[in-house]
Image (cartoon, rainbow, N blue to C red):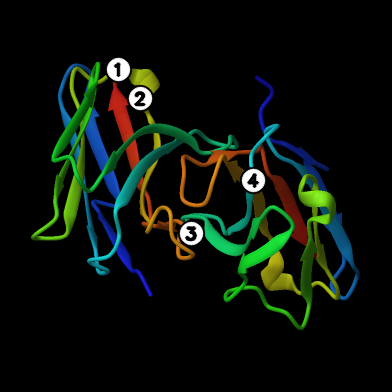
Amino acid sequence: GENVEQHPSTLSVQEGDSAVIKCTYSDSASNYFPWYKQELGKRPQLIIDIRSNVGEKKDQRIAVTLNKTAKHFSLHITETQPEDSAVYFCAASQAGTSYGKLTFGQGTILTVHP
Amino acid sequence: EAGVAQSPRYKIIEKRQSVAFWCNPISGHATLYWYQQILGQGPKLLIQFQNNGVVDDSQLPKDRFSAERLKGVDSTLKIQPAKLEDSAVYLCASSLDNGGKQYFGPGTRLTVT
């Protein structure tokens, strides 16, 4: 089955700096890669996703890049703000197939210091 | 648009007792997922339904866990008997179709003592 590794496990930045979180996946058949943000005691919220036919996607201060050859994808947050502090999870799946379940990474605790 | 609803939000039980969780997905979403999230870890899929049929239950501990989705809408997840290691947050999610964007409910925090 799919295995997703996420790094780093914790990340501390100053407000205004950029933050990058990286994930690798094992199954070359995976074609859908979402990122979720989870604040303490809250539900995971989808913040951005990318499909395997696209190399990069951007939404305001967040962007995701995908390298299918190397089987890794990354989340980039620019101009970080204290409200970006949360746990971020990457995930991978074979969307549209009977293997459409999401396999999640272990999570990254992001702390943005004012 | 109303989100995914779950109840109860919190539950404390003793080991060997039974417990049930309820989920109401976003209207029109055919696919429903139950995840287990242990503290400090990412969610792990327990079972996935497409309408009222099971698509994937490979990681469901079937000796104690069961789930159903009658009529292809609401779903219940049951644990009987509970063990200490079942303490976790149980998240329900739904998507329009298999593998589409998944939206999560608020979860049920289960504590087994």
As shown in the figure, which amino acid type bears the numbered disc 1?
A: Gln
Q: Considering the image in quadrants, where does the N terminus of chain B appear?
A: top right
Q: Choose mark 4 or mark 3, whichever is in front.
A: 4
Residue most extreme to the right: B17
| Residue topped by disc 4 | B30
Q: Do the residues under discs 4 and 3 have CB atoms within 8 angstroms?
A: no
Mark number for residue B48?
A: none
| Labels 1, 4: one chain | no
- Residue at the location (31% across, 62% down)? A4
| Residue topped by disc 1 | A81
| Residue topped by disc 2 | A84
| Labels 4, 2: one chain | no
Q: Choose mark 1 or mark 4, whichever is in front.
A: 4
Residue B57 pos. (x, y %): 62, 71
Q: Chain of mark 3?
A: A
Q: Do the residues under discs 2 and 1 have CB atoms within 8 angstroms?
A: yes
Q: Please say if A36 is above or below A73.
A: above
